[in-house]
Image (cartoon, rainbow, N blue to C red):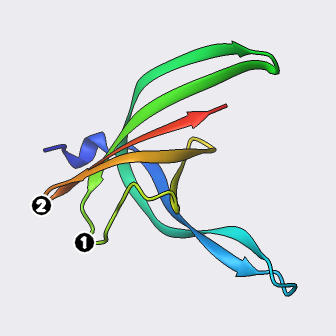
Amino acid sequence: MISTGHMKERVTWQERTATGDGQGGYTNTWTDVATEWAKVTELSSDRLLLSDGVKYNRAIQIDMRERGDTYTADPKYRILWDSQYWTVYSVVTNDSMVRIMAYVRL
């Protein structure tokens, strides 16, 4: 169990929504679902030298209180934290806590 004093970061859970463009197609937009206090821990970071430059990868763990909503690792969700958009790849819940694993490629 994490004490409230350790939850010092604000994270925003976002959901992708397809919005019609009026010409038969659609555009993806992101809508905020919830903004919560959380404990964020960086798990790893690395860099790759590719033909188009250096790419950075970071992985984080987010611990926050369970709200009763369904958090999933579905591609229609992402996390906004530290001015970056994080892809969710794992969500584990119990009665009181949610643990989210996410990564970003810069």
Quarter in which the N terminus is drawn: top left
**Is residue 98 visible in the rendered structure shown here?**
no
> At 41% across and 45% down in the image, what residue appears?
89
**Is residue 27 visible in the rendered structure shown here?**
yes
Q: Residue furthest front?
A: 24
Q: Is residue 4 left or right of residue 77?
A: left
Q: Position of residue 9 (x, y in %)?
A: 43, 45
Q: Which residue is mark 1?
A: 68
Quarter in which the C terminus is drawn: top right
Q: What secondary structure is found at the residue carrying circle 2?
A: loop
Q: Position of residue 15 (x, y in %)?
A: 53, 67
Q: Residue furthest top?
A: 49
Q: Is residue 59 left or right of residue 19?
A: left
Q: Which residue is mark 2?
A: 95
Q: Is residue 6 left or right of residue 95?
A: right
Vertical placement of residue 22 versus 42, above or below: below
Type of amino acid at the residue the image marks with label 2: Asp
Q: Is residue 104 left or right of residue 2?
A: right
Type of amino acid at the residue the image marks with label 1: Gly
Q: Image quadrant of residue 83?
A: top right
> At 52% across and 55% down in the image, what residue appears?
78
